[in-house]
Amino acid sequence: MKRFGKKLSTLLALSLVLSLLSGCGSKEAAQAGTSSEAEGPIVVKELNIAFAPYDSSETIMAATEPLCAMLQEKLLEKGYDVQNINLSVGASYEAVGEALSAGSADVGFISGGTYTLYSDDCDVLLTALRSAYSKDSENPADWNDGTPGEYTGEMSTYYRSIILAGPSEKGQALAAKVNAGDDLTWEELSGATWVVMSASSASGYIYPSLWLNERYGKTISDLPNVVQADSYATSMARLASGQADIAVGFAHLQYKYADQWTSEFGGTAPVWEQTSVLGVTQGIYNDTVSVSKASDVMTDDFRQAFGQSMIEIGETEEGLSIIQTFAHTGYTFAQDSDYDGERAAQELLKSLS
């Protein structure tokens, strides 16, 4: 793999085309309660929302389709008649960041890592809340005790990334060594095939790179056998098939894809039996809902209304079922300084490139 800086500059040049565009027509509803009856609601002709590829485009688009009507209803209550909402999935995390920079996306659901790369051109509006995961130890052997991970029901402002070995011969050899309490060498890890996400993905690239640097003075860019995936579903499919020995991603990778592991990805036994955690990163501040500074739509008042609408949607049963596609369980208003730790991580990786 090329050095991090070269990789990033290449990714920034990717096409800004967002796939599977979906539009929602204007919603017929009563007058907005926050606007006077004489004036009526403020008309917003079009709102463009882009999602990072947290999952396959098809999965995200199918899950988020009801979000259009829910947003239109909530925003109308706050005095905004949004006549059309376009939902899309970016070809990469960077593609959504570039779309926010250009103003072709008004709102982007992106990782903290992506936000910090593009914070000159967009503002963080919301931080996602996540259900706390039962496995949280930084000792990987604790994750491989034979019990499935699960959500605890508590809310968390951070998550972790894991380095996950698959069922390939090399993956199993690495797992056996970790579970025996032995340390892995750089030579052993660099001899494996890794599947990762794009260079601005916090759990799929940045924090695994920091984990490698802390232990070996290396990053993902130093690994000779790396494949980039377009989604975590693709990563897990490659791991199950043996095309990759190691995958990196959010802590609940095994939990999220437990059913698909055997039903779609080709796993021959439960994911808990065929995969093992080799490493666990430090905590990562949660994903963002960010808004474009170049957007004519995202005025201060409309930002506030949109943010409050998403918070309220996340508190409903139907809304929760939508945002859980991104492993989000709600939202809270954010500030830029929340992501200073992410900036420090980015700066470290740049210094190593």
Image: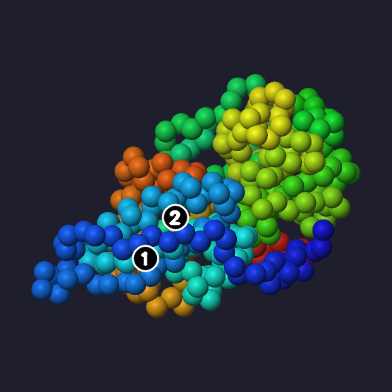
**Distance from the alpha carbon under mark 2 to that under mark 1:** 25 Å
Using the image as rendered, state which of residue 116 and residue 89 is in the foreground. 89
Left or right: where 230 falls relative to 241: left
Residues at circles 2 and 1 in contact by the CB criterion of under 8 Å: no
Q: Is residue 282 visible?
A: no
What's the image's color scheme? rainbow
Q: Which residue is the extreme one toward the left? A: 38
Residue type at tag 2: Thr
- For marks 2 and 1, give the one nearer the viewer: 1
Residue type at tag 1: Asn
Query: Which residue is denoted by mark 1 in the rendering?
Result: 84
Question: Counting residues from the N terminus, which is met first, the one under dot 2 or under dot 1?
Answer: 1
Query: Which residue is denoted by mark 2 in the rendering?
Result: 127
Q: Residue at x 68, y 57 (%)?
A: 198
Residue 144, percent from left and from top = 67, 27
Label 2 neighbour load within 10 Å: few <14, some 14-19, many 20+: many
Establish if 146 lies above or below 23.
above
Q: Residue at x 74, y 38 (%)?
A: 239
Residue 349, percent from left and from top = 71, 61
Left or right: where 206 falls relative to 79: right
Left or right: where 257 falls relative to 68: right
Using the image as rendered, state which of residue 346 and residue 164 is in the foreground. 164
Q: Which residue is the extreme one toward the top? A: 146
Q: Secondary structure at mark 2?
A: strand
Query: Looking at the figure, which quarter contains the C terminus?
Result: bottom right
Residue 196, percent from left and from top = 71, 50
Q: Secondary structure at mark 1?
A: loop
